[in-house]
Image: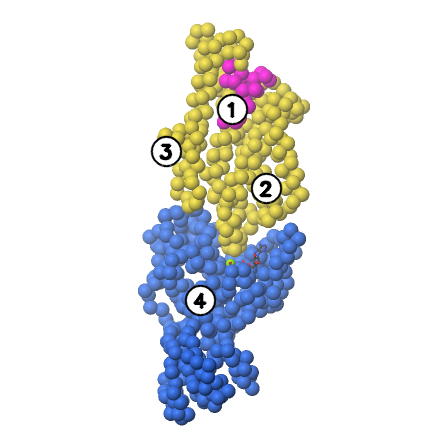
């Protein structure tokens, strides 16, 4: 298996309904010199087996704290973390040091880091062998596995090089190979592409996606870049001030009226041209994208519709179209045409009237 | 004094110095390395955080380091006799030399180990490594170039201290310089001793720097390589 950025990937997602990472009411409070910072404030996270799950949020939102709590590099203040059916918080014991069982559980969770964290004193191959040394594997087995993994990430020819001789993207490939050495079911990635240029970011994301598809690896990734979520994630969560404020599969999010994540994943702009006009955002997914709804709307109600902006994009492997249209008259005058659009199975957002819509949607 | 008179004296002195410095360096490394690592591990936020132990070790190291060697030597007389059975001669000099060098080296180790990127420690923890794994696979190998430089510094310092060991009849180059050069006005003897010391120290410094640099070169350290202290032109 040799995965390169250009290799076509099997389109089939490997997602199942089993939750492989679950956090329940997770809180983390840092106490230093009498000051308290609540980094996580009751986080419930559910990552399904085989999916790429993105957590996005602004700096200081608590993303790193969350991912570090998943393998207990950071001890949660309260709440539980379950990975692959095992309650890690129960293994953790009382002291600050990681007991044997927790260490064994960690060896089955891969982790990649923003700054790669490769040992400069070791060659690329020896870096990949390190987790295998910790697992007590024999020398022959270690080098066989390491070379196999380096081949998988496309770096077979760099086995004898030192990290200092590699580019950032190559270092991250080594980091990924190393994270896979213990045959993990779960890969944690904290800003793995944040130190890389856009081109390299794409190739690393493609690699993660391929590993996810080909090995059935569940990936939990942290990022502050919407593009990362857009290009690889099946599901996403938005964090603010230590809480998850929105979460779901990408298509669920796009179908949620007023979703901040959806709007950020798929931004639209265009201002209303006058006071007595109503701006409506229409989101098409799958089937509905093929129906000529806008012209039907114009004919049925005999109104003039202006298109302010439109785009079609692939989000999380889904074809999605969005269009911002303008209807004559105020919002109150357009309740019927908007209802017509919603009946056609389209998702409608009226900027400035979110709350009204959410209420209507709930009825 | 003729050269044929001086030669055996100088040869003996060289061996005495080498013997004292060699053994005390070995003991300083064996004792100071774990102590220095322990200072880092027990510190706040360290893997074996223990504020009390850290303070106690730190204090002992500080006191031992600040004592002038000649006082340490006198203060340790009883201890030295207990260990070696005597308080004079080369063996007796090794005890205070080593005791003085352990905390000296430990502080240098502490500084070197602190420089290791904490991300590497976390990476090994995330793989399921324990504290001992972190020490063996990360802290020591990653700080090796600095540890070698620290050893070089310690050897050079020990050559200096060993000159004072002449006062307990341990011999060595410093002893010759004092006895012949200062007490008997044999200036020629003194200058030869000085020259030998200068050469020995330069060679040790050069070898140490070379070893540290060649290890460093392959590494991904972001900081500049340690500078050659004596032979800048060679770089
Ligand atoms: N070890 C720590 N001690 C004290 N406070 C901390 C510690 N680590 C994080 N914090 C605080 O917790 C909050 C959340 O930090 P965290 O690193 O999880 O944010 P983040 O979302 O990863 O941000 P970024 O995008 O900048 O990496 C911040 O206010 C931060 O200052
Ligand atoms: Mg972070």
- Residue B159's disc number: 1
Which chain did the image draw in blue?
Answer: A
- Which is more N-terminal, label 1 or label 3? 1
Q: Residues within 10 Å of mark 3 (few under 14, many from 20)?
A: few
Q: Does the magenta stretch include residue B166?
A: yes
The residue that appears at 38% across and 83% down in the rendered structure is A306
Q: Regarding mark 4 in the picture, which secondary structure is present there?
A: helix
Check whether the beta carbons of the residues at disc 4 and disc 3 lie within 8 A of each other.
no
Q: In the image, A322: left or right of A257? A: left
Circle nearer the viewer, 3 or 2 = 3
Q: Residue B235 carries which label?
A: 3
Ligand 1 is located in which of the four quadrants? bottom right
Q: Point out the frontmost of discs 4 and 3.
A: 4
Ranked by sequence position, the earlier of labels 1 and 2 is 2
Q: Pick whichever, B162 or B235, lies toward us.
A: B235
Asked if residue B148 shows in the view, the reply is yes
Secondary structure of the residue carrying numbered label 2: helix
Per the model, the C-alpha gap separating discs 3 and 2 is 35 Å
In the image, residue B56 above or below residue B78: below
* B202 sits to left or right of A362: left
Label 3 to label 1: alpha-carbon separation? 26 Å
**Residue A229 placed where, x, y %?**
44, 67
- Give the foreground label among 3 and 1: 3
Magenta-drawn segment: B156-177
Q: Is residue B31 left or right of residue A223?
A: right
Q: Is the magenta stretch mostly helix, strand or loop?
A: helix
Task: Please state the chain letter of the residue tagged with numbered disc 4 in the rendered image.
Answer: A
Residue marked by disc 4: A226
| Quarter holding residue B226 | top left
Image vertical order of residue A242 relative to residue A256, above or below: above
Q: Which chain corresponds to the colour yellow?
A: B
Label 1 Cα crowd, 10 Å radius (few <14 / some 14-19 / many 20+): many
């Amino acid at each position: 298996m040799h995965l390169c950025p250009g290799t076509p990937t099997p389109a089939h997602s490997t997602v199942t309904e089993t939750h492989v990472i679950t956090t329940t009411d997770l809180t983390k409070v840092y106490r230093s010199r009498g000051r308290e910072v609540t980094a996580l404030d009751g986080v419930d996270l559910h990552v399904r087996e085989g999916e790429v799950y993105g957590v996005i949020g602004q700096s200081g939102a608590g993303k790193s704290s969350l991912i570090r709590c998943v393998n207990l590099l950071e001890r949660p203040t309260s709440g539980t973390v379950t990975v692959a059916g095992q309650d890690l918080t129960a293994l953790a014991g009382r002291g600050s040091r990681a007991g044997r069982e927790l260490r064994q559980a960690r060896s089955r969770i891969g982790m990649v880091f923003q700054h790669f964290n490769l040992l400069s004193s070791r060659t690329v191959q020896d870096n990949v062998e390190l987790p295998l040394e910790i697992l007590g594997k024999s020398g022959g087995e270690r080098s066989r596995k390491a070379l196999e993994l380096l081949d998988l990430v496309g770096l077979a020819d760099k086995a004898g090089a030192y990290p200092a001789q590699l580019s950032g993207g190559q270092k991250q490939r080594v980091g990924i190979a190393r994270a896979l050495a213990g045959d993990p079911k779960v890969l944690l990635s904290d800003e793995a592409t944040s130190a890389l240029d856009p081109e390299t970011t794409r190739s690393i994301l493609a690699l993660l996606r391929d590993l996810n598809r080909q090995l059935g690896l569940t990936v939990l990734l942290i990022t502050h870049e919407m593009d990362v979520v857009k290009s690889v994630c099946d599901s996403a969560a938005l964090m603010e001030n230590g809480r998850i404020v929105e979460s779901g599969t990408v298509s669920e999010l796009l179908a949620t009226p007023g979703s901040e994540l959806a709007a950020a994943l798929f931004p639209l702009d265009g201002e209303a041209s006058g006071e007595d006009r109503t701006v409506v955002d229409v989101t098409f997914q799958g089937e509905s994208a093929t129906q000529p709804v806008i012209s039907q709307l114009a004919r049925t109600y005999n109104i003039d519709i202006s298109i302010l902006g439109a785009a079609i994009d692939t989000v999380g492997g889904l074809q999605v179209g969005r269009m911002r249209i303008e209807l004559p008259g105020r919002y109150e005058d357009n309740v019927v045409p908007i209802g017509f659009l919603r009946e056609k199975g389209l998702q409608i957002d009226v900027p400035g009237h979110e709350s009204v819509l959410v209420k209507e949607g709930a009825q | 004094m003729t050269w044929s008179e001086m030669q055996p004296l100088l040869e003996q002195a060289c061996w005495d110095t080498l013997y004292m410095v060699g053994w005390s360096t070995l003991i300083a490394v064996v004792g100071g390395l774990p102590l220095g690592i322990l200072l880092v591990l027990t510190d706040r936020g360290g893997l074996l955080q223990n504020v009390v132990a850290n303070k106690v070790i730190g204090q002992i190291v500080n006191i031992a380091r600040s004592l002038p060697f000649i006082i340490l030597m006198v203060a340790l007389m009883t201890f030295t006799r207990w260990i070696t059975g005597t308080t004079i001669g080369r063996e007796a000099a090794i005890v205070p030399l080593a005791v003085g060098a352990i905390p000296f080296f430990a502080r240098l180790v502490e500084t070197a180990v602190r420089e290791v990127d904490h991300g590497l420690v976390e990476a090994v923890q995330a793989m399921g490594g324990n504290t001992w794994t972190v020490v063996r696979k990360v802290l020591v190998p990653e700080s090796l170039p600095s540890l070698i430089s620290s050893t070089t510094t310690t050897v050079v310092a020990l050559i200096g201290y060993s000159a004072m060991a002449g006062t307990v009849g341990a011999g060595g180059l410093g002893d010759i310089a004092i006895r012949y050069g200062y007490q008997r006005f044999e200036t020629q003897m003194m200058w030869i001793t000085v020259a030998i010391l200068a050469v020995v120290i330069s060679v040790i410094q050069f070898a140490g720097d070379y070893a540290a640099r060649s290890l460093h070169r392959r590494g991904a350290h972001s900081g500049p390589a340690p500078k050659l202290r004596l032979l800048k032109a060679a770089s």
